[in-house]
Amino acid sequence: MTIKDLLTSVLEQLQLINQNLNQPSISPEIIVALIAAFVAVFTLLYNKQRERHLNQRNLKEQKYISFLSALILLKGGYGTSKELIETIQIMNLIGSSDVVQATSNFIDLMITKTTLSKDESPSESEPISPEAKQAIQDQRYNALIKSMRTDLYGKKCNKEFPSELPFVVFGKTDEEKAQDLIELLQKKKLT
């Protein structure tokens, strides 16, 4: 093949490319319509996913608030353990693993534990003093609130969160609780 033949072949190829560019097989209107359809579908899918995420976050907010309310009502002597148990079960379903673990740790100390674990006390069988139990309960409550906030709003939301957030309940005194119990028993006797 001579140089003249090679140049002729290249020239023919360039003319063919030029013709294809001048007369494309797909019109520009179709290309623009395809791009617009792709953008519309992407936007629709993104908005659906965002809406689903917001609905899930709103549900979690409501359930976390219900849990904290039931917890405070029970601790204050106004609620029932049934309400608390129901909200704990819901939280076990919808909460992140950190929230479920923090809830379990907090409830364990608040309701069932009477002794400290090895990491909280040198002796596993040492009874918990009310002050020590309150301090540990405050730590676990703080961890619970932080895990809920992280689950709802992301890791950055706790950046300036207080390191100590006490679990404070302004509830009935022991005398008021005893009086309520007496009234309840009297009502049951009457019925």
Image (spheres, helix red, strand yellow):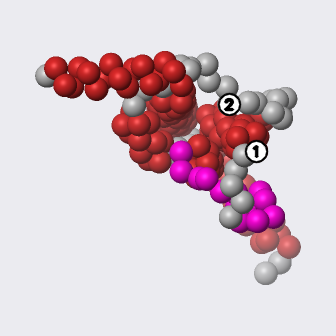
Three-letter code, disc 1: Ala
Residue 182 in which image quadrant? top left
Q: Position of residue 154 (x, y in %)?
A: 69, 37
Three-letter code, disc 2: Phe
In the image shown, does 155 or 166 lie closer to the viewer?
166
Q: Position of residue 29 (x, y in %)?
A: 51, 30
Q: Which mark is residue 191?
A: none
In the image shown, does 103 or 110 lie closer to the viewer?
110
**Quadrant of image for the N terminus:** bottom right
Mark 2 touching mark 1, by CB under 8 A?
A: no
For mark 1, does the 10 Å Cα neighbourhood hold few (<14), some (14 to 19), or many (20 or more) residues? some
Q: Is residue 172 above or below residue 93?
A: above
Q: Is residue 45 magenta?
A: no
Segment tinted magenta in the rendering: 111-124
Q: Which residue is mark 1?
A: 132
* Residue beneath the point at 48% across and 30% down: 74
For the residues labelled 2 and 1, the Cα–Cα distance comes to 13 Å
SS at mark 2? loop
Q: Which residue is mark 2?
A: 167
Evaluate whether residue 139 shows in this view: no
Q: Is residue 119 magenta?
A: yes
Q: Position of residue 91 (x, y in %)?
A: 48, 42
SS at mark 1? helix
Name which of mark 2 and mark 1 comes first in the sequence: 1
Evaluate whether residue 106 shows in this view: yes
* Residue beneath the point at 61% across and 53% down: 114
Q: Is residue 125 above or below residue 180?
A: below
